[in-house]
Amino acid sequence: MRVTWSGGDLSFRLDPEDEITGKASDEHPVKLATNSCSIGGVPDDAHPDLIAVAAWTVVAPWTRRRVSFDRAVSAEVAAALHDGWGVEAGPVGAQPRQAGRTLAISYSGGADSVAAATIHPEAPFVHFQRVSHPRVPNRWPHYRSDVLARLAATTGREVTTVTSDLEFTLAEPRPGYPEHHAVAAGALLLADQLDLGGLGFGYELGSRWLGGDRYLHRYTPDNPMWAPHGKWGRLFATAGVHLVLPVGGVSEAITMRVALESELRGHVRWCLRGTDGPCRTCGKCLYKELIQAAVERRPLDTPITADRPVARKWLGKPPYGGQEMIEYALARVPGIENTLFAPALDYFEATEESTSWLDHCYPPAIDEIPERWREQAAGFMTAHVGFMTEDEARRVETWGS
């Protein structure tokens, strides 16, 4: 893979051994649509390690043996790419970037992101906004990135919005991030300007420790995407921007509660389609409504019925994506037996007691937060959530076994 940056424009050329259809870090197949993308509002003189890592978040799925950048990178970044992906990276010759002092939040506006922002109220936001690509038709026009960007701009927090068409490098399964970490490409390129030493994400217990919705639904301490000691965490750290997961130890029930009790509650928006509010008809709205109903101990309020395609995955046998939250809701939503989730009751014997571990924080998630920001996260969890007992932590560590 040969990578070239010109301003905020990234272009790349595949080597003979590279592949048009590759796999992301979670083994999900991704097909390449085009060999260029742009990131707007970023400086031309970012540290070469930042430029290299930002590019790698885009080209990693299709690169097999080597990646050649158009400027020298540090030996540390080259070593992280070799150790993590088995690729030879070069040229080598730059001095490594020193980590900055600031933690920023990669802010989407969803409940998990808002919860992370609530723990660190002093942290500025970097919001990543999808825009159209000049050479790739938009096959997902209902994605209202403009609405999400406007919401981010009205939070009252310091917000830097980065525009990019990099999601259109994907042909399949649909426009989206080649790697989940590509959402950080803009923040990486702004890291010198913002003095970033860490970038906070809203990935929670399910995404960090329980495998996420593309894994085998099992305890995954070495999660290749979000373990700070994993290959992506090490690569970001070599560029002086540490991965920080402030809510990595709590469930989506907790992030939902924290978000809805925060000063940013009026800005929470997990729906990608709605204009004046959530669309209430997409799969994500259904899933988040289930969690919110469980947190608020009220009946499910959705127009979606069992015959809708977005409900189909809940009608079959588990495992389900976010299965821990399905069990949590089955035990707490009044009248759940009269909803489209009723078939799931045949597979679980969920009770409030059996799912109470999801109301507390998994302690190892705090331990892996970089020391500079660890105490603040620990203090929040102590004051507002509480930590799991040994028996509750064992529920995490035996998940899926």
Image (spheres, rainbow, N blue to C red):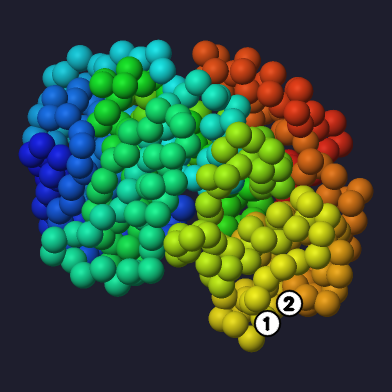
Residue at 19% across, 25% down: 46
- Tag on residue 340? 2
Task: Please state if 99 lies on the left or on the right of 345 as rendered.
Answer: left
Question: Quick one: SS at disc 1?
Answer: loop
Say which residue appears at 66% left-offset and 43% top-offset. Answer: 260
Disc 2 on helix, strand or loop? loop
Check contact, mark 2 vs mark 1: CB within 8 A: yes
- Residue 253: x %, y % from top left: 71, 47
Residue 220 visible (yes or no): no
Q: Quadrant of residue 357?
A: top right
Residue drawn at point x = 64 percent, y = 62 percent: 287
Q: Residues within 10 Å of mark 2 (few under 14, many from 20)?
A: some
Q: Which label's residue is closer to the chain start, 2 or 1?
A: 1
Q: Position of residue 120 (x, y in %)?
A: 55, 24
Task: Identify the residue at horizontal 62%, vertical 18% (top origin).
Answer: 376
| Vertical position of residue 370 compared to residue 67: above or below | above
Give the Cα distance between marks 2 and 1. 5 Å
Q: Amino acid at mark 1?
A: Ala
- Give residue 142's position: percent from left, percent from top: 38, 68
Q: Which residue is mark 1?
A: 306
Q: Which mark is residue 213?
A: none
Tell me: residue 309, above or below residue 104.
below
